[in-house]
Amino acid sequence: MFRIDAGSDVPIYRQLVQQVRREVMLGRLRPGDQLPSVKEVVDALSVNPNTVVKAFTELEHQGLLGPLARWVERARRDGLSAEQIRMLVEVALDEPAAGEDDRLAAGGAA
């Protein structure tokens, strides 16, 4: 499931997080699916276990695998195509976060 680009400037744990995000968005990871164990990832990629734990902890902290997967599933049930879902996500990513405009207008940090 995971691949590592050793020549990338992106930290390995971040590469793992990004790959899980992509799998969720593409619908290849669904609610209830289980990620490989830390040991399985370590054995497959020959990386430090702490790196994998850090990636899994970040995914858990972000709640990525729960809410996002449920949202995609609900969108599919409501009849949206994969392309429509992608477009919605792209629009959401391009828009400032709620309240971000207010902070910027007030001179605060984004």
Image (tube, rainbow, N blue to C red):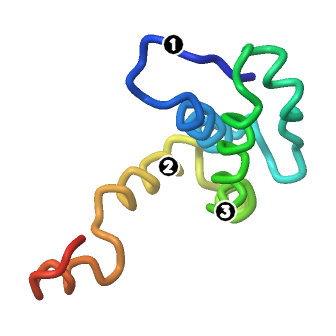
Q: Which residue is mark 2?
A: 84
Q: Position of residue 17 (x, y in %)?
A: 60, 40
What amino acid is found at the position of numbered circle 3 in the picture? His
Q: Which residue is mark 1?
A: 6
Residue ID at (71%, 52%):
57
Residue ID at (52%, 14%):
5
Q: Position of residue 74 (x, y in %)?
A: 71, 63
Comes first in the chain, label 1 or label 3: 1
What amino acid is found at the position of numbered circle 2 in the picture? Gln
Residue ID at (27%, 77%):
100
Comes first in the chain, label 1 or label 2: 1
Q: Which residue is mark 3?
A: 61
Q: What is the quadrant of the C terminus in the image? A: bottom left
Circle 2 residues within 10 Å: few <14, some 14–19, many ≥20? few
Tell us which disc is closer to us: 2 or 3: 3
- Is residue 52 in view? yes
- Is residue 76 in view? no
Based on the displayed image, in which of its 4 quarters is residue 9 positioned?
A: top left
**Cα–Cα gap, marks 1 and 2:** 34 Å
* Labelled disc at residue 89: none
Residue 62 shown left or right of residue 27 in the figure: left
